[in-house]
Amino acid sequence: MAEQEKRAWWKEAVIYQIYPRSFADSNGDGIGDLNGVTEHLDYLARLGIDVIWLSPVYRSPNDDNGYDISDYRDIMEEFGTMEDFDRLLAAAHERHIRVVMDLVVNHTSDEHPWFMESRQSKENPYRDYYIWKDPKDGREPNNWESWFSGSAWQFDERTGQYYLHCFSRKQPDLNWENPTVREEVFDLMDWWCRKGIDGFRMDVISMISKDQDFPDGPDKGDGFGDMAPYVCNGPRVHEYLQEMNRRVLSRYDLLTVGEAAGVTVEEAKKYANAEGTELGMVFHFEHTDGAANSDAVIGKWTVTPPRLSYVRRILNKWQTELEGKAWGSLYWDNHDQPRAVSRFGNDSPKWREKSAEMLATVLHMQKGTPYIYQGEEIGMTNMRFHSVHDCADLEEKNAWQQYVVEQGVVDEKTMLDCFNHVARDNARTPMQWDDTENAGFTTGNAWLAVNPNYKTINVKAALADPHSIFYYYQRLIQLRHTHPIIVYGRFRPLLEDSEEIYAYERVMDGQILTVAANWTDREVSCHLFEAIKGEMLITNYAEHKPGVLQPYEVQVVLCDDKD
């Protein structure tokens, strides 16, 4: 029962994700940094968020924008110093904003001292920190394809073996079978906890346990096999996380969320179990899975917008099946996803604001902890890529090389169209602070081009307009902090056959919260609210027409339960 739900601060919080490279540049080198974040903490406090999650800021050669770590106890030079981090942490805490770090321990950089030692010889004490295998018939140990295209194995001439890299070849996977590796990880986590951070977002944590037989994967049709069945939710993953919980997490009051590639609802119930033996919550990817959601061109790459019927089915499944068993996380976009209003809404000038507010309401009124990605609160949109040279992301470059250049299975125009719809760089364009050059992000040359629409879509304009998306998000956050039903109420789906309306109820302590949202750019019939006499908590239209929902209109009504 929702009324008996165990309460926790991180269930009631709203998290704001910061991608530091693209948030704010304080020194004019074109790259966002820690001091840039500190300078904008008052803006985040004004929005009303409770937590900031920092994408990786550790020392890194930056092959994958910081997700390739060479020193877990130091800061990337481009981002500043450890003193800058300490100042940010203290300034955030002064404003009652907690700080969550991005923990990347499925892999390290190939420039991490552990790996540099590991590749010296087969007898090196660090050899077993990583996953090394002999060639099979003179080739890779198996047919696995990296998430970033190409083989997941890299041959090392010095020792005549291959090492596993599920991502870039410069991101060798750690061998969690080795207890010394786990000790190293727990020690670095404890080091950050003692520094005073408030939690961890755990990168691809569902991949730390591999099938030790390392079999070939199912044929993907591109010359490689799918490794997912053998690296996601592996045989010892829950054992490892329970050990992590005992050794570190249970000793502090932390927010913990695991990025869980390939996670099912049943697995999520284990990761985020109500007993608290592993993590607080996980991110799943079903509602953002372009291949499952639409007609993919190849792999994840698609130009087809998500279907409401698919998105609703997935979100409702997670809402209802986690009830009372595990806690969920709520998000539309992040640093690995395109902009929410461009993907799920309508980013045209006419409907951008209404659809962004509709999407925000649908998400923030559900059960789970909501995440806002930087710029989402002002309705930032996807970029337009005219050439592969406009792209900075390794995933895009590798996909272009494999599918366009080497295999020729996708033409250039189609691949660019795919990038414009779902590429990660869409989320990584610099934060749009004002209408000055480079959107106020930097006084130098931005590391990635600013979206040209910054002249009209920016923080300064949003703060000056009392009816902006920013203030709508502010109201949503305030409502969550005010009404326990929004956090803890049971979820009941409504109108599940509708092709136009996403609707549901939240129920708790004799109250019902009813939410209905029009996902289209046309007026649709809706009679849900005709018999409800209650308080309109929030809507994105000043005037409501009885019996209909206007384009992208959303309504949230709170009333007493008459049953």
Image (spheres, rainbow, N blue to C red):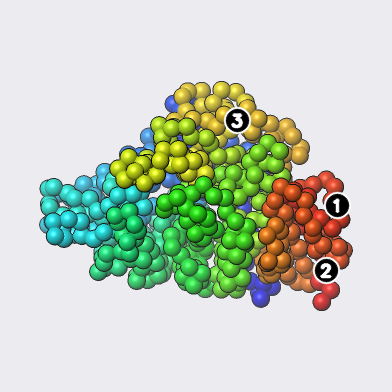
Cα distance between the residues tagged 1 and 3: 34 Å
Image location (x, y in percent) of residue 525: 79, 58
Q: Nearer the viewer, mark 2 or mark 1?
A: 1
SS class, disc 2: strand
Q: Nearer the viewer, residue 21 or 7?
A: 21
Comparing marks 1 and 3, which lies closer to the viewer? Answer: 1
Q: CA gap, disc 2 to disc 1? A: 23 Å
Does label 2 or label 1 sit earlier along the sequence? 1
- Report the front residue among 463 and 49: 463
The x, y position of residue 319, in whole percent, is 61, 67
Residue 72 in sight from this viewpoint: no
Quick check: 236 above or below 16? below
Q: Position of residue 57 (x, y in %)?
A: 42, 42
- Horizontally, residue 47 falls left or right of residue 238, namely right
In the picture shown, does residue 194 fall above or below 459?
A: below
Describe residue 411's horizontal placement relative to residue 52 as left or right. left
Give the residue drawn at x 40%, y 41%: 411
Q: CA distance from mark 3 to mark 2?
A: 44 Å
Decide: marks 2, 1 in contact (CB < 8 A)?
A: no
**Residue 454 bears which disc, if any?**
3
Q: Quadrant of the C terminus?
A: bottom right
The foreground one among 294 and 372 is 294
Residue 560: which numbered mark, if any? 2
Residue at figure coordinates x 26%, y 59% from the top left: 143
Foreground tag (3 vs 2): 3
Q: Earlier in the sequence, mark 1 or mark 3?
A: 3
Q: Amino acid at mark 2?
A: Asp
Q: Secondary structure at mark 1?
A: loop
Q: Which mark is residue 545?
A: 1
Mark 1 residue type: Lys
Q: Which label's residue is closer to the chain start, 3 or 2?
A: 3
